Amino acid sequence: MASRKSERLINLTMALLATRRYLSKSEIFRTVDGYTGSDESKERMFERDKDDLRRIGIAIEVRSLDPLFEDEPGYRIHPESYSLELGDLSGTEIAILSLAAQAWRGAALGASAQSALVKLHSLGIESDFDSLPALSPKVSVDSANFLPLAQAVSDRTRVSFTYLSAQLIQEKRVVEPYGLGSRKGIWYLVGRDLSRDAMRTFRLARILNDVELERASGIFSVDLDFDVLEFLDSHLFVERAIAQVRLRIGKGHALRNGAKILSSDGEFDLCEISYQSQDRFIDQLLWHGEDAVVDSPQELRDRVISKLNSLVSAHD
Amino acid sequence: MTSQKPSAGLDDAARLLDLVPFLLSHQGISIAELAKKFFVTPEEITSDLTTLWMCGLPGYTAYELIDLSFDSGFVTISNAQTLDRPRALERNEALALLLGLETLLEEISSTNADLASSIAHLIEKISVKVGESAALRVKAGSPTASALRAKISEAMDSRAFLRISYHSSAHDEIGERIIEPLEFSSLNEMEYLEAFCQSSNGFRTFRMDRIISAQIHHGVEVAPKVDSNVSEPATIAFSLRVLDRARDVFERFSLNSLSLASLESTREIPAQSFSSEWTLREVMSLGGAVAISSPESLRSAVRDRAQRTLAGYSNPSY
């Protein structure tokens, strides 16, 4: 049954691609193999087939055959819209695209990446990996919500989901999704939170259920030059400050990355370290215990001391 | 991107359409190889080919039908008619390529300007296919260690050993180890390498972002037989009292919904880890938002470390 159906879909696609003029339904039913039964059932089959082809990305163009009688539509598929048009591609470019597709191994868009690769390899251009360095990129997306959210972003569809708040309370959120972006391996959804009427950032890993997409699409607008990574950089990592921290020699490896050593007294190096979020920086400093001591700024030093006092009293 | 459930046979139809141009550029490919390329069984491919053989242009005589031969187990095609070009990329496919390219660009942009400009050029071409400025709005920006991953994959493929320099976070030490890499894994958006570690004679998990370098190891050490001597990291159990920042606690100690329930009733939760040093540091880093209730040894260890750290602040800053 399924193979009869796909056979008909292939025949229809081939016929609509071959024609230079628009074919009427009766022509299609007369000439394309697979349309059987009463007129009514042929009609139903054809409507269904059109929707199905659209679903796999094949656009059937419809045009009125007779300007005087609009009820006689004609159909065809433009070869240019049907086929892969990426201009001239070199063997090196095919190799680069293969690497890009391989980056999805096991992740959310793995199947789409593979089918894209099959299409690229069908162009018959030999991939040239020799001109590339040995690379193995990886896109890390664990969340099953990635794909529906990407769809909602691109269709401008409202979404709702349950989100884990900082107090560990499960909250229902309704969001107009503006963008989806990752920083340091973590994926974020950026959008307007309708209940708060403000822009908010959500970590995909903290969305607890399957997101629900509203039916209507295109109901809000996003500035054309909205750039999700720029937004994340300016809202997530806003503080960008510099601290002077004494790090015990031979310790504090994670903090030394990118730090500048100002002086050394044999036991500690005095280092200049830049950080983006004070809260996260304090967490990191405390992780290092007595191997990291803040000299300045004073406010940072005071906050660390106060947290250390809380630690002592919580464990008394 | 399709939201409705496609009707039966639609995936098959899409695959049939994609098979034709693929076969045209891979004449003589074996059915087994073809099945692998399309992620289906050889039986499904054979059934696909049988269906395709009945398809063609109106008229449906030998002149119009697609001509296939695959009796020998190897496939050749002729008369592909209007299906000779691969189909346009669907939106998800274009999105997958685009994000893959962005990830790649992020990694190499500073080291190889020629390659970076080729990638940027491809990003431009593919962005058009994603359309609607969505390209700007779904973006991967995570630098990942591509060259490192390629080196590790090479060792996996050739079953070679690696000498790695690794930053052990719990002990804040950088050490060398000889490992046999087994597979990549990921948890909570972090990427890990599972390996047999010769240096500790046990299976170990390494966080990818803490592997500083890796070289193929040509030494003569033979992997010890995996036997009862293989050490498994022992787990230690402890109990936490949550005072604040519940979500951070929940995420950092990888707690499950069971502990969530006990958190709601008592604020006291049982947890476990592989290292008391790691636990100590996590508790320190939460700065009083969480307290160890038991065991007493761990509880006093946190207090001692906090006091020693405070001592470092008793001198005025200089």
Image: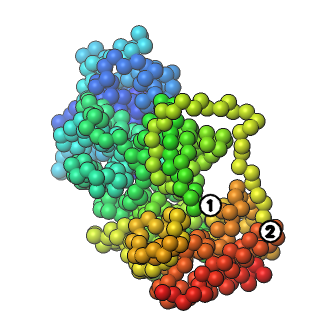
- The amino acid on which the numbered mark 2 sits, given as a three-letter code, is Ser
**Dot 2 surroundings within 10 Å: few (below 14), some, or many (20 or more)?**
few
Q: Is residue A218 above or below residue B129?
A: below
Q: Which residue is rendered at x = 75% and y = 54% of the image?
A: B235
Image location of residue A119, percent across then percent down: 33, 36
Image location of residue A24, percent across then percent down: 26, 39
Q: Which residue is rendered at x = 25% and y = 38% of the image?
A: A131
**Dot 1 surroundings within 10 Å: few (below 14), some, or many (20 or more)?**
some
- Image quadrant occupied by the C terminus of chain A: bottom right
Q: Is residue B229 above or below residue B271?
A: above
- According to the picture, the residue beneath numbered tag 1 turns out to be B170
B229 lies left or right of B113: right
Q: Which residue is rendered at x = 33% and y = 68% of the image?
A: A227
User: How far apart are the alpha carbons under marks 2 and 1?
Assistant: 18 Å
- The amino acid on which the numbered mark 1 sits, given as a three-letter code, is Ala
Per the image, label 1 sits on a secondary structure element best described as loop
Name of the residue lying farthest toward the front? A266
Sequence-first tag of 2 and 1: 1
Q: Which residue is rendered at x = 31% and y = 33% of the image?
A: A121
Per the image, label 2 sits on a secondary structure element best described as helix
- According to the picture, the residue beneath numbered tag 2 turns out to be B297
B125 lies left or right of A288: left
Q: Work out whether residue B288 or residue A65 is closer to the camera in this orientation and state it.
A: B288
